[in-house]
C-alpha cells in the first residue's frame, strides 16, 4: 500500500513543479482576496454578530405548556408572568425552564412513580378537581 503511493509521487515528480507553482499562485491570490473581503466587510459583520449575541442574551426562550404534560400529572400555573409547570399531585410549581417533557417526567417518576400506571383520564380528573379548587379560591 505504502509502496504504491510512493511510486506514484515519484512518477508525478516531473509535473509536480508546475502544479506547485500553480498552487502557489492560487494561494497568493486567495490570501489577497481573503484580505480584501476581510477589510471590506469585517466592520459590518462584527456589528451583526454583536446584535445577534445581544438578541440571544435578551430573549430567554419561554417554554409553553403542552397538554401531553398531563400524562406526567402536570398542569400549568397561571400565577406567574411566564407559564410554569404545576404538579397536580404534590402541588409543586417548577420554574419555566422545567416546562419540558424530560424534566416533568423525571419529577413524576421520582416522586409519583406509584401513579405511573394510571390512565390519562385519572390525571384529567385531578386537573378538573384542581381547577374547581382554584375557582372556589378566587371567588
Ligand atoms: Zn409532584
Image (cartoon, helix red, strand yellow):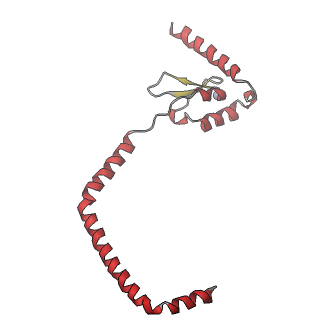
Q: Is residue 104 left or right of residue 12?
A: right
Q: Where's residue 132, x and y in %? A: 59, 11
Tag count in the figure? Answer: 0
Q: Where's residue 122, x and y in %? A: 70, 20
Residue at the extreme left:
40
Which of 115 and 90 lies nearest the eye of the viewer? 115
Q: Is residue 46 left or right of residue 82?
A: left
Q: Is residue 116 left or right of residue 27?
A: right
Seen at 65% across and 19% down, the residue is: 124
Seen at 70% across and 34% down, the residue is: 109
* On screen, residue 59 above or below 15: above
Q: Where's residue 10, x and y in %? A: 52, 92
Quadrant the N terminus occupies? bottom right
Which of 9 and 138 lies nearest the eye of the viewer? 9
* On screen, residue 36 above or below 132: below
* On screen, residue 40 above or below 9: above
Residue at the extreme top:
139
View quadrant of ligand 1: top right
Q: Quadrant of residue 38?
A: bottom left
Seen at 55% across and 35% down, the residue is: 98
Q: Is residue 61 left or right of residue 71?
A: left
Q: Where's residue 107, x and y in %? A: 64, 34
Q: Quadrant of residue 104?
A: top right
Seen at 59% across and 26% down, the residue is: 67
Amino acid at each position: 500500500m505504502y509502496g504504491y503511493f510512493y511510486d506514484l509521487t515519484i512518477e508525478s515528480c516531473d509535473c509536480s513543479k508546475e502544479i506547485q507553482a500553480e498552487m502557489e499562485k492560487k494561494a497568493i491570490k486567495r490570501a489577497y482576496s481573503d484580505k480584501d473581503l476581510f477589510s471590506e466587510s469585517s466592520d459590518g459583520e462584527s456589528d451583526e454578530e454583536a446584535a445577534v449575541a445581544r438578541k440571544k442574551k435578551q430573549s430567554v426562550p419561554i417554554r409553553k405548556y403542552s397538554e401531553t404534560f398531563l400524562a406526567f400529572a402536570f398542569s400549568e400555573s397561571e400565577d406567574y408572568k411566564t407559564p410554569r409547570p404545576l404538579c397536580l399531585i404534590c402541588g409543586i410549581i417548577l420554574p419555566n425552564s422545567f416546562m419540558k417533557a424530560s424534566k416533568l417526567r423525571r419529577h413524576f417518576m421520582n416522586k409519583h412513580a406509584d401513579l405511573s400506571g394510571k390512565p390519562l383520564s385519572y390525571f384529567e380528573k385531578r386537573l378538573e378537581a384542581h381547577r374547581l379548587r382554584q375557582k372556589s379560591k378566587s371567588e
